[in-house]
Amino acid sequence: MSETVPLDLSVDRVRVFLDGEIVGSLTLSPAKTVAFSYESSWLSSGFSISPLSLPLREGVFVAKRDPLHGLFGVFDDSMPDGWGRLLTDRLLRQRGIDPYSIGTLTRLSIVGSSGMGALEYEPAAVIENSVAATDLDDIARECANLLETDFSEDLDQLFALGGSSGGARPKILTEVDGEEWIIKFPSSVDSANIGEQEYQISVLARECGIDMPETRLFASAQCSGYFGVRRFDRTRDDDGTEHKVHMISAGGLLETSHRIPNLDYGLLMRLTMRVCNSTEECERLYRLMCFNVLIGNRDDHAKNFSYLYDRSRQAWRLSPGYDLTENPGINGEHTTSVNGKGKNITIADLASVGVKAGISRARCIAIANEMQDRIRDTGFAVRD
């Protein structure tokens, strides 16, 4: 049972839990960055929640100030971003609280048990009432109204449904057929039919051999539909008991901000091999790289690649694909470069990255060519 308290602006210690087990504690260091230590019980039976920065050992780990504002990447992944941050800050202002006065630990307390992945934080601050999703068109209108006017009569509901989410587009976290889903809505710069476009790309990705979660196009009376994806950070036992799956992004592992375009797919391949110790996982990443290049998804930043931990196998694996859309990127360049290039990427460039990861050149070229043909056959324009 989570400990919930009224919003405390001066939280100085947060306990971290995973699937009901205490993992460790967070405090502030003298430099006002986060300090973390594992609980003794977790040291004897748990695993490293961030293999590169927080190895499973005794002691106090102190985060650097930059680039994650004094946080370790694995905890930064729990923080709402984009739409979720906007909702949180506006709800705080509505309650007369300056968002800039809220410290890191207080924000994790606000996340509580509602964050992405499996980590939960106590004490969990309560600043909203529990509500259920209603008509999707009504929610879409409220999202658009909030983006346009900085005001919503249903801000409490929007926060309860999407306050812990990341990404720029408005979204809600809701239940569909007894399972947890994410449903997205257009942002102020999106076309009204962005949901159908993302759904079509998700279908194409699956046809191209990308491991994808279940996706749906939810009906709408005002557009062609809203894109929904079943959450892959949730799993169920045979008896129906749900568990949260620990997840960390590439940015979280590397302690880098997704706003800094400093990654190359070669580095992601080396990261995948180090964390997963599997050529098969590297091949899954290779397919994802090819797909991002060929459909023109240039918003391939450090938070759009994640890793899941399987406690039964005591092993990490690359997550299914997500946030796959056509995106022009900044100045037409990929956020994550391919063979050192941000644009004008060739099949040879793709293959070069794959070969360095231990995949044969013939297989690399075959995968890229087959994917290119599949994309062309469906009518999508092949990019780069």
Image (cartoon, helix red, strand yellow):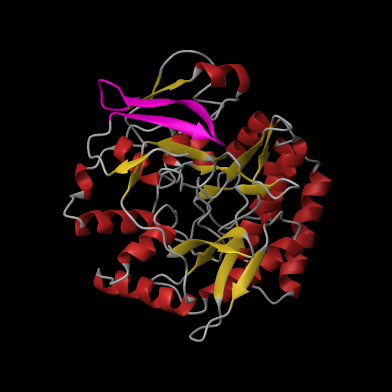
296 sits left or right of 133 in the view: right
* Residue that appears at 31% across and 70% down: 146
The magenta-colored residue range is 12-33
Above or below residue 101? Residue 51 is above
Magenta part, dominant SS: strand
Of 1 and 18, which appears nearest the observer?
1
Considering every residue shown, the one lying at the far top of the view is 58
* Residue that appears at 31% across and 54% down: 88
Res. 188 in view: no
* Residue that appears at 26% across and 59% down: 90
Residue 329, percent across and down?
47, 60
Of 362 and 122, which appears nearest the observer?
122
Considering every residue shown, the one lying at the far front of the view is 1
Is 28 one of the magenta-colored residues?
A: yes
Residue 257, percent across and down?
42, 41
Residue 265 falls in which quadrant of the image?
Answer: top right
359 sits left or right of 168 in the view: right
Of 187 and 75, which appears nearest the observer?
75
Residue 78, percent across and down?
45, 43
Res. 116 in view: yes
168 sits left or right of 361 in the view: left
Of 259 and 121, which appears nearest the observer?
121
Residue 196, percent across and down?
58, 75
Q: Quadrant of the C terminus?
A: bottom right
Above or below residue 227? Residue 17 is above
Is 16 one of the magenta-colored residues?
A: yes
Above or below residue 53? Residue 343 is below
* Residue that appears at 47% across and 73% down: 134
Total marks shown come to 0
Residue 64 falls in which quadrant of the image?
Answer: top left
